Image: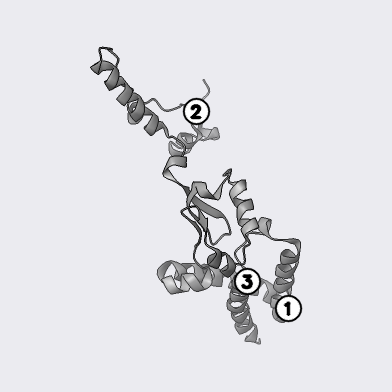
Amino acid sequence: MELHWIWEVILIFFIGTFILRIGGRKSISQMTISQTIVMIGLGSLLIQPVAGHGLFITFAAALLLTVLMIFSEYLSLKIDILETLFTGKAVMVIENGKPILNNLKKIRLSLDKLETRVRQAGISSLEDIQYATIEVSGQLGYELKENKKPITKEDFIIIMNELSLIKQSIGYDEAPITKTSQLNPNPNNIFLEVNNKNHEGNKKEP
């Protein structure tokens, strides 16, 4: 049996990976109609060399592509340069409330599209953001400025404890707020349910 299809599959995987990397960092939901058509077309064109070799070869090629994908992901974990080649790195697009236009050009993302993603994250102004990145998946990662971050439960407890100390110093007798670690967890917390392996099938009837 001719085995030249193996080399064809290996070339398809590596060349196809780099072609799609050039295409940009977007998930399917973020692609335009034309981008989606191009990606589907590329997939069809890339697989054509092994498509006519029969059912067994088709399944073997699919298995080999899967093995190559797993192998490349493993190499990406071990070697930083290969991670950059295969998957890329996050790109900083906002710093201290200002968009980094040069980086936006590198990833072919317009300022309007960036603002769209910021609005989708529930942020009304770029100036509220300390840092923002476009991740390898195409998603927006961000950190708000200190004065724009929402207050956490821990922050609230610290503030209330300080208020209690002030009240005590002027004559009020009030116990401080219980520390976060001492608060009773919600018995219906679905994360604790997973952690305690108390899934639906394992729950006891009350």
Q: Secondary structure at mark 3?
A: helix
Mark 2 surroundings: few (<14), some (14-19) or many (≥20) residues within 10 A: few
Q: Which residue is mark 1?
A: 48
Label whose residue precedes the other's in the sequence (1 or 3): 3
Which color scheme is applied?
Answer: one colour
What residue appears at the point 58 percent right and 46 percent down from the top-left corner?
121
Q: Which residue is mark 3?
A: 20
Q: Tell me where residue 164 sits by quadrant.
A: top left
Residue 108 against residue 174 in the figure, above or below: below
CA–CA distance between discs 1 and 2?
A: 53 Å
Q: Tell me where residue 139 sits by quadrant.
A: bottom right
Q: Is residue 11 left or right of residue 147?
A: right
Mark 1 surroundings: few (<14), some (14-19) or many (≥20) residues within 10 A: few
Locate the N terminus by quadrant: bottom right
Amino acid on which disc 2 is placed: Asn
CA–CA distance between discs 3 and 2?
A: 44 Å
Q: Which residue is mark 2?
A: 188
